[in-house]
Image (spheres, rainbow, N blue to C red):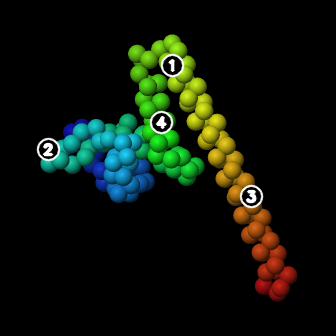
């Protein structure tokens, strides 16, 4: 294997995703292996793993595959030093939109968690009240 490259199994283990999930994200065009071995095995680099980590963090917040693709495209463009001026400003605004959406979704999850904790406490009270 080439230095700095890892096969899909190691990539999956390091990121905490299944091989099947990584293949699904590849089919969806979210992450592509940086190379292939002589035997045709997918080979990933650390930047590929970083992309997978972004996707993994977006998933529980309910972002769609299209939204994930849009954010990754935005991040790729912002990493390109050739992108300047108004284009860079527009990309930064787009990134800000994703940040606001993520914050809103995190707050919604906090609200759900608070409701669930309240329910669990209510049940615990009922258990104590009824002799448990």
Locate residue 69: give its quadrant.
Answer: top left
Tag 2 secondary structure: loop
Q: Which mark is residue 114?
A: 3
Residue receiving disc 4? 70
Q: Are marks 2 and 3 in contact (CB under 8 Å)?
A: no
Which of marks 3 and 2 precedes in the sequence? 2
Tag 3 secondary structure: helix
Residue receiving disc 2? 38
Tag 4 secondary structure: helix
Residue 11 in the image: state x and y as whole percent. 34, 49
Q: Is residue 53 left or right of residue 46?
A: right
What is the crowding at mark 2: few (fewer than 14 residues within 10 Å), some, or many (at least 20)?
A: few
Please identify the residue farthest to the right as the structure is shown. Answer: 129
Tag 1 secondary structure: helix
CA gap, disc 2 and disc 3: 52 Å
Check the image and report above or below for 1 versus 123.
Answer: above
Which of marks 1 and 2 precedes in the sequence? 2
Which of marks 3 and 4 precedes in the sequence? 4
Foreground label between 4 and 3: 4
Please identify the residue farthest to the bottom as the structure is shown. Answer: 131
Q: Are marks 4 and 1 in contact (CB under 8 Å)?
A: no
């Amino acid at each position: 294997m080439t230095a700095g490259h890892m096969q899909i199994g190691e990539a999956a283990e390091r990121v905490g995703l299944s091989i099947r999930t990584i293949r699904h994200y590849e089919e969806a065009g979210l992450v592509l292996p940086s190379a292939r071995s002589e035997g045709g095995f997918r080979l990933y680099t650390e930047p590929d793993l970083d992309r997978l980590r972004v996707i993994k963090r977006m998933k529980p917040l309910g972002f769609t595959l299209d939204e994930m693709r849009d954010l990754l495209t935005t991040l790729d463009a912002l990493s390109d030093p050739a992108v300047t001026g108004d284009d860079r400003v527009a990309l930064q605004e787009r990134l800000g939109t994703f940040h606001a959406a993520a914050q809103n979704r995190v707050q919604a999850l906090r609200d759900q968690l608070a409701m669930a904790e309240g329910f669990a406490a209510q049940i615990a009270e009922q258990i104590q009240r009824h002799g448990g």
